[in-house]
């Protein structure tokens, strides 16, 4: 089942603009991660933010986490055509048997036009 | 280090057949998880293996099974294929049970005709 809902489902912007994607989830989490997927290929890990963190940066990426609202946002600044992809949030749940299980959101399709 | 590899990359099968997909994790990674991605259901957790043992399982029928070998390589098997099994199957690995970041392979695109 999908834990997260992402908003918007699709986003089209011009190169150089900023892109913001939002993710909401339902249960308590260990951490939240963002992944990128190009055209039905594998998932590329972008950034991980732990439940006790509120904001994290990595290059042009900025992620925020609000556990009280059960939501997160991903901001890509100064977007490039190469950023065109689908972006997924995933909540990480520690399982009683050990290990983790990622529960993914529905994804945001980002298109960056020249 | 080399990334997660999956073979084959593309597969076409007919209903009723069975299929085996293979995943080689990043060297040193002991945990391997499998996910199914479809347009309708999105990304869903299938199961996770650690040290040759299935530790966790998602909500999939028994037709979906897997195993892990002593070198951490993993295979998943789907028996009696159905049209709805057409999907991108993704494998992910991480170092151990305390690691949070899962690294994904390129996936195997399975088409069931």
Image: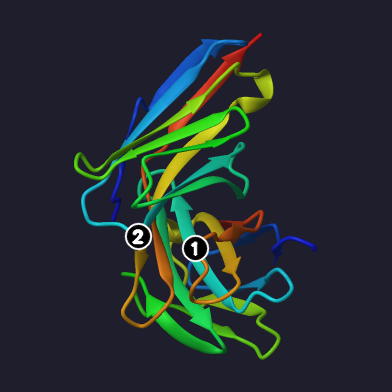
**Residue ID at (39%, 78%):** B56
Q: Name the residue beneath numbered marker 2.
A: A30
| Rendering colour mode | rainbow
Q: Quick check: B60 above or below B37? A: below
**Residue ID at (41%, 28%):** A21
Q: Quick check: A39 above or below A78? A: below
- Left or right: residue B88 versus residue A93 is right
Image location (x, y in percent) of residue B41: 35, 50
Q: Chain of mark 1?
A: B
Image location (x, y in percent) of residue B26: 71, 68
Query: Within 10 angstroms of label 2, few (less than 14), some, or many (20 or more) residues?
Result: some
Q: Secondary structure at mark 2?
A: loop
Q: Residue B11: which quarter of the image?
A: bottom right
Quarter that holds the C terminus of chain A: top right
Q: Name the residue beneath numbered marker 1.
A: B100
Residue A15 can be seen in this image: yes
Residue B79 can be seen in this image: no
Q: Nearer the viewer, residue A46 or B11?
A: A46
- Left or right: residue B62 versus residue B16 is left
Q: Marks 2/1: CA distance?
A: 9 Å
Q: Quick check: A8 above or below B98? A: above
**Residue ID at (46%, 85%):** B54
The reply to whether the C-beta atoms of the residues labelled 2 and 1 are less than 8 Å apart is yes
Q: Nearer the viewer, residue A43 or B22?
A: A43
**Residue ID at (53%, 35%):** A57
- Left or right: residue A27 versus residue B55 is left
């Amino acid at each position: 089942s999908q834990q997260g809902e992402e908003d918007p489902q699709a986003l089209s912007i011009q190169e150089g603009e900023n892109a913001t994607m939002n993710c909401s989830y339902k249960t308590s989490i260990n951490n939240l991660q963002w992944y990128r997927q190009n055209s039905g290929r594998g998932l590329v890990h972008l950034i991980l933010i732990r439940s006790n963190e509120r904001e994290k940066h990595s290059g042009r990426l900025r992620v925020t986490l609000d556990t009280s609202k059960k939501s997160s946002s991903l901001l890509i600044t100064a977007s490039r055509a190469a950023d065109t992809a689908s972006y997924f949030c995933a909540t990480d749940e520690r399982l009683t048997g050990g290990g983790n299980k990622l529960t993914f959101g529905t994804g945001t399709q980002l298109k960056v036009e020249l | 280090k080399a990334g997660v590899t999956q073979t084959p990359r593309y597969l076409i099968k007919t209903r009723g057949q069975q299929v085996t997909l293979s995943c080689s994790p990043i060297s040193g990674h002991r945990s391997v998880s499998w996910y199914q991605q479809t347009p309708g259901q999105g990304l869903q957790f299938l199961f996770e293996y650690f040290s040759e043992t299935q530790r966790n399982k998602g909500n999939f029928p028994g037709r979906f099974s897997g195993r892990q070998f002593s070198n951490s390589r993993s295979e998943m098997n789907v028996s009696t294929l159905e049209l709805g099994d057409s999907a991108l199957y993704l494998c992910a690995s991480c170092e151990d049970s305390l690691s949070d970041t899962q690294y994904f392979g390129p996936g195997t695109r399975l088409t069931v005709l």
